[in-house]
Amino acid sequence: MDEISSRGKQNRYIFGVTLVASVGGFLFGFDLVIIAGALPFLETDFHLSPALKGLAVSSAIFGAIIGPLSGLWFAEKLGRKVTMMVAALFFMVSTMGTALAADIWSFSVWRFVGGLGIGLAMMSSPIYIAELSPPHKRGVLVNVNQLSNVIGINLAVVVSYFFSFDGWGWRWMFASQAIPVLFLMVGLMLIPESPRWLASKGRMEEALAILKKVNVAKMAEQELGNIQKSFGSATGGFEELMQPGIYKALIVGIILMIFSQINGVNMMLLYAPSILADAGVSVGSSAILSSIPIYVFIFICTVAAFGLIKRFSRRGLLIASVCGMCAAHLLMAFILHRHWPPIVTLIPMLIGTGSFTLGLAPLSWVIISEIYPNHIRGKALAVVCFFLYLSSFITAQFFPVLTHWFSERFNDPAGVYIIFALICLGCVIFSWKMIPETKGLSLENVASLWTDKPVDKDLLNVFKRI
């Protein structure tokens, strides 16, 4: 009975800590869709061209590019928890600035500041959760970050619709973000630091005390011993990223996260009301209302993903997910080319976003949070996230321009979705050939997978030429 009670207490503790850490994911999702809801009003108020529409969206992503590298010092020197607190401060400054922006340029500057917070939060939160979680719960707990992201997305839709009126409506959309930011700040004061980060600084007693809160005492001591061995004589410097095994893991992580951003489904989320408006749905609140089924469906799929991640292999679920996304893009291209009724475009949008949310969206973060050795994880994640947001920035900036070009040249934007379908096909091949199975392994055992396998020289040569 005492063992059951103790286990329940451990589960509640892990969930509570994970919930706070995942608020960074909530804010990322909220920010992602608030701009989607505000964009039709910004376009009218600031007279935006297609290029400036891209700037309004991508300015935050540009800040997110810098966030991981600038936050590396915080994550390594001051800890994962402090890094999340710095991210929260950036979120708060951005919230006030965007709500009061006088023009598209000042609006984009404050969005850039918020992007710095996104970059910091989305680097530090998954690492923190993965480093605190027991191996058998890690996949599910890291997916809590994705669930928070989707809750943020859905709440942003409600807020966008509630404030979808001319004048100051879009400003209230951005101002509303202050509430979850305050929750994050307060919550961060109550949670501990990552035990693996504490161990890396020689603070073994503190690390053991935290590990005992998430595991039985004997297993906590054994885990701490494994953590100490994993550091060994390694320095954790950037030069270690070039070691054969780690280099391969770095390349795999970078390419996986690039695929997670350039696959086109993110553009369905960022521009959902605009896509529906372009397809023929009236702008403003009607377009936002029409996009609600997409965001609600994403939430349902995210909840379903917990069971799928627990039941199926990481690799198999990832491949199935991307196949579904590929099919959705082909269907979208067909519908747009045939000029079917605008509301029909919801079908491929639901298939694409659902497939993405069931597999690639959560698993990309789960995989990159667990494939690197303890002593180099922060640096590896910083590099991976840099490429993630760089690819996201490029895609968000040029998606409206590319869509406009196809519409002008071919009378419909179907060609854009053909391109995305080909990208998804490339991701399927990459996942099949290069992604290892990591389910159920400790972080220390996952790291050894790379050194036990030969480096794919052809892939390395391709990467070096990029």
Image: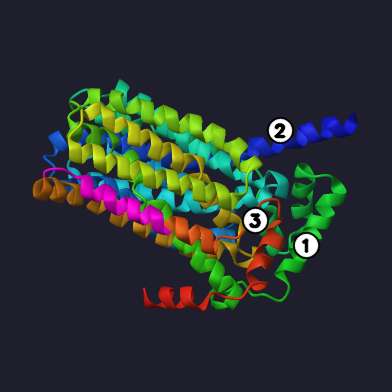
Secondary element at tag 1:
helix
Q: Amino acid at mark 3?
A: Thr
Q: x, y (%) of residue 329?
A: 32, 44
Above or below residue 405? Residue 349 is above
Q: Which residue is mark 1?
A: 226
Q: Is residue 422 magenta?
A: yes
Image side of residue 234 versus residue 51, left or right: right
Distance, label 1 to label 2, CA atoms, is: 25 Å
Sequence-wise, the earlier of marks 3 and 2 is 2
Where is residue 17, by image quadrant?
Answer: top right
Q: Is residue 258 magenta?
A: no
Residue at horizontal 70%, vertical 51%? Answer: 440
Magenta stretch: dominant SS?
helix
Q: Quadrant of the N terminus?
A: top right
Mark 3 packing: few (<14 Cα in 10 Å), some, or many (20+)?
Answer: many
Q: Residues within 10 Å of mark 1 (few under 14, many from 20)?
A: some
Left or right side of 91 for 271: left
Please, what is the three-letter code of the amino acid marked with disc 1? Asn
Q: Nearer the viewer, residue 315 or 235?
A: 315
Which quadrant of the view contains residue 188? top right
Give the residue at x 45% y 62%. 255
